[in-house]
Image (spheres, helix red, strand yellow):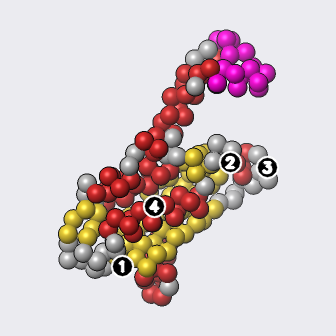
Amino acid sequence: MNDLIRQLLNELGEDPDREGLRLTPKRVAESLRFLTSGYGADPDEILNSAVFQVDYDEMVLVRDIEVFSLCEHHMLPFFGKAHVAYIPKEKIVGLSKIARLVEVYARRLQVQERLTQEIAATIEKLIDPEGVGMVIEAQHLCMRMRGVAKQHSSVTTSAMLGVFREGPTRQEFLRLIRD
């Protein structure tokens, strides 16, 4: 990867051998490996290590989970907060594993819409809850730094599965993430 980044610097009109850039290929390669480390993680394995049988049937909500990802179209960052809720049938999952799941999918080249859906679908598949509610609110540097250059724009995406698709559960979830 270092050679590719050196070539990229050349293509941009830079001298990769100048003092400030000599270590840039190595630093960029390390950064990209970290920012895309989600490809090496198994989301099923992460959740399965912390699934518990519990007699609980009220909403479980983990909100304000920080999200940092790279847009797959421009490889520029987008960042914000994720809110994840589910209503268990017979199983719950460790709360920190929900945040970890968000991180695993965010550490891949992404579009926010897919990121939202992947997290909700994984929770649904692994613990079979009554439903899953998922909202991500993010700001995209590709919209701020290039193209339309809109500094105050944000994007909200949602995935509502099962009992979260409509009615009082959906309304309760949306109210709770706004409080």
Q: Amino acid at mark 3?
A: Gly
From the image, tell me which residue sits under label 3: 147
* Location of residue 153 in the rendering, given as x and y in whole percent from the top left corner: 69, 59
Task: Say whether marks 3 and 1 touch (CB < 8 Å).
Answer: no
> Would you place residue 155 above or below residue 17 in this image?
below
In terms of depth relative to the viewer, which is nearer, 105 or 14?
105
Which residue occupies 52% across, 62% down?
A: 116
- Distance from label 2 to label 1 (Cα)? 34 Å
In terms of depth relative to the viewer, which is nearer, 160 or 63?
160
Dot 1, crowdedness within 10 Å: few (<14), some or many (≥20)? some
Which residue occupies 70% across, 21% down?
A: 7
- Magenta stretch: give its range: 4-19
In terms of depth relative to the viewer, which is nearer, 155 or 161?
161
Q: Amino acid at mark 1?
A: Glu
Element under disc 1: loop
* Location of residue 108 in the rendering, given as x and y in whole percent from the top left corner: 52, 46
From the image, tell me which residue sits under label 2: 73
Dot 2, crowdedness within 10 Å: few (<14), some or many (≥20)? few
Q: Is residue 133 magenta?
A: no
Task: Say whether marks 2 and 1 touch (CB < 8 Å).
Answer: no
From the image, tell me which residue sits under label 4: 119
- Distance from label 3 to label 1 (Cα)? 42 Å
* Location of residue 41 in the rendering, given as x and y in whole percent from the top left corner: 40, 45
- Sooner in the amino-acid sequence: mark 1 or mark 4: 4
Dot 3, crowdedness within 10 Å: few (<14), some or many (≥20)? few
- Sooner in the amino-acid sequence: mark 3 or mark 1: 1
Nearest to viewer (mark 2 / mark 3): 2
- Distance from label 4 to label 3 (Cα)? 29 Å
Tell me the tag on residue 130. Answer: 1
Residue 31 visible to the viewer: yes
